[in-house]
Image (tube, rainbow, N blue to C red):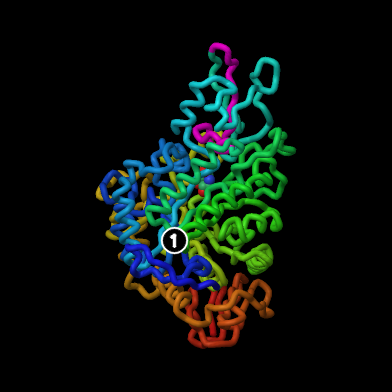
Amino acid sequence: MARLTLVRRADDRRLTDDEDWWRDATFYQVYVRSFADADGDGIGDLEGIRSRLGYLELLGVDALWLTPFFPSPMVDHGYDVSDPRAVDPLFGDLNAFDRLIADAHQRGLRVTIDVVPNHTSDRHEWFQEAVAAAPGSPERARYLFRDGSDFSGSRPPNNWTSTFGGPAWTRLPPKMNDAGQWYLHLFAPEQPDLNWDNPDVAADLERTLRFWLDRGVDGFRIDVAHGMAKPAGLPDMAHPIEVCPGLLGAEVVDPRFDADGVHDIHRMIRQVIDKYPARMAIGEIWVSDDAAFARYIRPDELHLGFNFRLLQADFDAVSVREAIERSLMAVQGSPAPATWTISNHDSVRPVTRYGGGEVGLARARALALVQLALPGPAYLYNGDELGLPNVELPDWALQDPVWKRSGRTERGRDGCRAPLPWQGSIPPYGFSLSPGTWLPVPGNWGGHTVEAQLEDPNSTLSLYRQALELRKGHNAFTGAELEWYGAPPGCLAFRRKGGGLVCGLNTSGAQVSMPLGQVLLSSGPLPPSGDVLPPDTAVWLV
Ligand code: NOJ
């Protein structure tokens, strides 16, 4: 691991000098709308995050990933960006951002932010100009405008579908000398895809990266990092997916994503980032082929690639082990470690995914220990450390564009995005001064608040705090390689070569013998005899 002594930024007194700090960091994803609301409008904001930095320090994470806070009509809650170099007034302003970065750095927390280079909002000035301009104009050339594929122009240019459901093309109304061209949007119609063959597009992203790097951000999460480039001629999909629940992940060759040209874009991004010390980028890479995945993390491309295998695994030892082995294999030969996550703002929360209720919670806690035992960076999603389940929302409350685009067949992702409960016994539990929050908060979350869990040694919050403290401070957590132990059916056990941490997981319905060693931490209560591991439980030993 390269350790360089760097000239520090004025504000980062408590950050280490480690150029590669991200290699084993614990990142905490802040879904900005839902974390903490300081101005009382029922929507989380930057000052809200700043007011809770003490909590994040106490939790023990190393870095934050902030979801988009840029000006946006919020059709896709900020992933439809109308100005990538400013702050939406809903969330604050640039001064608030600067204060947040400075305070986070003072506390030794790095700050990474989302960038959204595949598409803009339809309210972005470029798209407005493109709509007003004529077919074939330079303004239209920044997006993917095409004539219809039939004589009258009324059939879309190809059969691509939007990942939110429905066609990936929308037609503009006809005008004088313009039959009405179609434009491509892999997501909502309000998120037109940029044309990455146009040099303006790359130049603008470079400006955006520099803008935020100069303000002190420590890195980026690149949205749809497998998108952006499109194959020449925009060939039809062999099997158009009508409605895509969640985001991709289908085991098919998909011409909408992973076009070869995308790697030049990542090289460009890397060159910009490399001009700044100790910064990084992670890509959201939904490709099913491991070799294709590995191409994104070559030495001159992304520092890290989001790997969703653990997130997609069932609560089952075989499935979890396969996800781990495949993830480790995929990065072999690349400089990047595997990156682990079991949750994010696009997926059902682990507690619910693994069965809900007490069992779901026990399993989510167990998987958290597995995740945090693995070598390489871990990404946590806000609220998982409180054991929050997905929220069953009534139809009227649903806001995710997936709900409407799927013809109200897919409920979308709002269930994992409810505002966080901080304190007290009634909604919104200290999230906001206003009772009216952007998504309703369940009435039975009093036991889930930070306040309720902080002093309880058995709470999920305490489990995460202990796990993060050990992960950071205990020398068992070193070594990039794993060795697998034999384990009873439905169980797995691995040891980190190097430090020697042993992690055991029991997904079977029965208790099994405990792996040998001294227990450091367990995800649930262990019987006093100390020699058995109960079902739905993980343990750390040395
Ligand atoms: C991936 C993001 O995680 C998701 O929330 C968003 O809807 C799409 N990209 C489109 O930007």
Apparent side of residue 69 relative to residue 506 in the rendered image (left or right): left
Q: Nearer the viewer, residue 454 or 337?
A: 337
Note whether 25 is above or below 390 in the view shown: below
Q: Is residue 178 magenta?
A: yes
Specify the amino acid type for callout 1.
Answer: Tyr
Residue 139 percent coordinates (x, y): 52, 27
Residue reaching furthest to the top: 176
Q: What is the chief secondary structure element of the magenta stretch?
A: loop
**In this view, 358 is above or below 209:** below
Give how far across and how far down residue 210 sits, in percent. Answer: 44, 49
Q: Nearer the viewer, residue 483 or 165?
A: 483
**In the shown orientation, is residue 257 left or right of residue 422?**
right
The image shows residue 247 at horizontal and vertical percentages of: 58, 46
Q: Which residue is mark 1?
A: 28
The residue lying toward the viewer, choosing from 239 and 407, is 239
Bounds of the magenta segment: 176-195
